[in-house]
Image: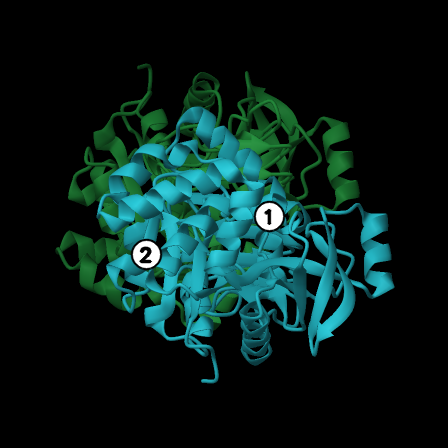
Chain colours: A green, B cyan
Amino acid sequence: MTKPENAYAVIMAGGQGTRFWPLSRRTRPKQFLSLGPSRRSLLRATAERVWKILPPERTFVVTSEEHREQVEAELPELRPHQILAEPVGRNTAPCIGWAATHLRRIDESAIMAVLPADHYIGETDAYVETLRRGLEAATHGDYVTIGIRPTRAETGYGYIEVGSELDPGVYRARRFVEKPNRQRAEQFVASGSFLWNSGMFFFQASRILEAIDRHLPGLGEQLRRYDEAANRGAEDALVRETYADLPAVSIDHGIMEKVSSVSVVPGSFEWSDLGSWTSAWELANRDEHANVLPEGSIAVRSSGNYVRVPEGKLVALVGIEDLVIVDSGDALLVIPRDRAQHVREIVETLRERDDPRR
Amino acid sequence: MTKPENAYAVIMAGGQGTRFWPLSRRTRPKQFLSLGPSRRSLLRATAERVWKILPPERTFVVTSEEHREQVEAELPELRPHQILAEPVGRNTAPCIGWAATHLRRIDESAIMAVLPADHYIGETDAYVETLRRGLEAATHGDYVTIGIRPTRAETGYGYIEVGSELDPGVYRARRFVEKPNRQRAEQFVASGSFLWNSGMFFFQASRILEAIDRHLPGLGEQLRRYDEAANRGAEDALVRETYADLPAVSIDHGIMEKVSSVSVVPGSFEWSDLGSWTSAWELANRDEHANVLPEGSIAVRSSGNYVRVPEGKLVALVGIEDLVIVDSGDALLVIPRDRAQHVREIVETLRERDDPRR
């Protein structure tokens, strides 16, 4: 492993997503599910990829208090101080800033690789190489992000415009662009100078805290209080008391779009933010009729379906096309594959009913 | 109850149907399921209707050996000798003939109402009135059947052509017609002189045995041997040994189409032979979007669906139309409502695989 000895991974596992209902729940969000072809949870897969270049003892996970035990179960390699449990989710800027204070206390020169726990990544070798390049660029003091080479005019992702090359494989990030409409997305892809914003970042812990102080001074001040409290062993109580008051700002919006020197490392590996069951179908191993079915299923004149049921259950489809069918044991969802994002309407109804199965 | 004291019901509960898979199984055929709006099994519902005019002690059930215990559980009112268990199903002529020998031994003048256990009947009062009329006609020595007034040009049923009126509400049956094609079915319905063949019959036990002797002499001979063996308490072994050799002939084909004096009593109650999940949808209480859904289901922009799941399971549909979705716990079927009869392809595949879930 050729990697800087002061590099740390911060895996963001605080998602509360409802997009994979009924498999994902408040109590078991997406990062704890296996989606795509692997049987490992997304969180576990994220950690194992990181461990190709960083050791488990330099891996931190930020999650919510209610999911702390699930993180411990998925990643028994971690010691308790490596899991930071937020009392409540406040988007990525507080999460990353808080983690940065922890790393800086351990190592003044700490470099952080900030990685979402709930994304799909295809080619691990290409990914690891990109990680290595990102960490290297951050060593020089840059704010670094990974941009994914777009393979289609996706309107569900943010984009990064790429500028001049700074170092081999490292470019100036000219600007961040919010999710575009179809036409702009097509222009971006055609131009060849736009990448998908992957939500993966690299920077020195001290540098991101400086940037927070400058651009989100309220957050910076509170993080300083946490840091001081930690030094006298009183951080937990203060965090529990005040975390909900932190501004809910994304690191993209709050920091990366404002700092002057952002670099982007293009990544050419297969990547998805797994925004819905549709993407799970896209990434899974499909049979010759484009179905993703449990072993032993019987599908007659059926194509393009994504079906998940409890282990051992028999699935029988006749004349069914392009549906997502998910049986979680206590709930059954049936929805057209190209409208899978509407599952949120179900979760919303369950919330109104105060049904615990949401 | 105004009824002849020598009238008996013979409920035919030997069906092995696969059309309601995955709820129906070899081990739990249709007559043991609740289909249509009632929560009672079809068998139980059949018996309770009969008991409006005949007492339980004059009710007999013919079933298969493997389902004897399920019949006992559904109808605890019956004593053991009232359940006749066939070692193997041989269609309706042997079943009815065998039951006739039992009734004749009890009562030389016994009249039998032969009733399928797995049909749906809507208006009980009209049905009971028709039963009464059928029994009455059989008292005069007729072979009597119930014909249902058709409400559509159904191609899935046999028809009976009605002739002259013999007694009030009792007509000569001119001929039996096999399932017609669409055009003939439309002609039948338009003519006003055709009824659906309901598979319900009435006759004296001695008279049907005479007819069997004449038209199915091989069967008649064997039934006589059963009768003699019964008189010396040795019927069970003989039946077990020889029942499989009886000719598998329907009472319609083997007898009713051949005897000269068949009467038909028109019935005006709602009736279905429950040929597929489609008919279960037709008969169930549908909501304002023509859905039949378990209580508590969430259906968004969905219509015309029939959904069954285990008790308490949450169903969520978004943008789904005209599907049959049946979750039996160990299996999940999804099939378009208008193609529900193709479920037999699933059962056939399971048979080839020797999968016990058929």
State the image coordinates of residue B328 (x, y, percent, origin top left): 41, 50
Q: Toward which corner of the image does residue A149 lie, by quadrant?
A: top right
Label 2's element? strand
Q: Nearer the viewer, residue A127 or A108?
A: A127
Residue behind mark 1: B255
Q: Is residue B69 visible?
A: yes
Residue B132, position in %: x, y? Answer: 54, 76
Amino acid on which the number 2 mark rests in the picture: Ile
Q: Which quadrant is the N terminus of chain B positioned in?
A: bottom left
Q: Residue at x 26, y 43 (%)?
A: B236
Tell me whether circle 2 and circle 1 mark residues in contact (CB < 8 Å). no
Quarter holding the C terminus of chain B is top left
Q: Residue drawn at (58%, 29%), measured in percent from left and top?
A: A148
Relative vertical location of residue B352 with respect to residue B224 in this rendering, above or below: above
Pinpoint the chain carrying mark 2. Answer: B
A357 and A135: which is toward the camera: A357
Which comes before the other along the chain, label 2 or label 1?
A: 2
Viewer-proximal residue among A96 and B7: B7
Circles 2 and 1 on the same subunit: yes
Q: Which mark is residue A6?
A: none
Give the Cα separation between the discs numbered 2 and 1. 24 Å
The residue singled out by tag 2 in the image is B83
**Left or right of A220 on screen, residue A337:** right
Q: How many discs mark residues in the rendered view?
A: 2
Q: Nearer the viewer, mark 2 or mark 1?
A: 1
Residue visible at 66% across and 29% down in the picture: A163
- In x, y percent, where is residue A238? 23, 64
The relative height of residue B37 versus residue B21 in the rendered view (above or below) is: below
Quadrant location of residue A311? top left
- Chain containing mark 1: B
Give neighbour class at mark 2: few <14, some 14-19, many 20+ (Cα, 10 Å). many
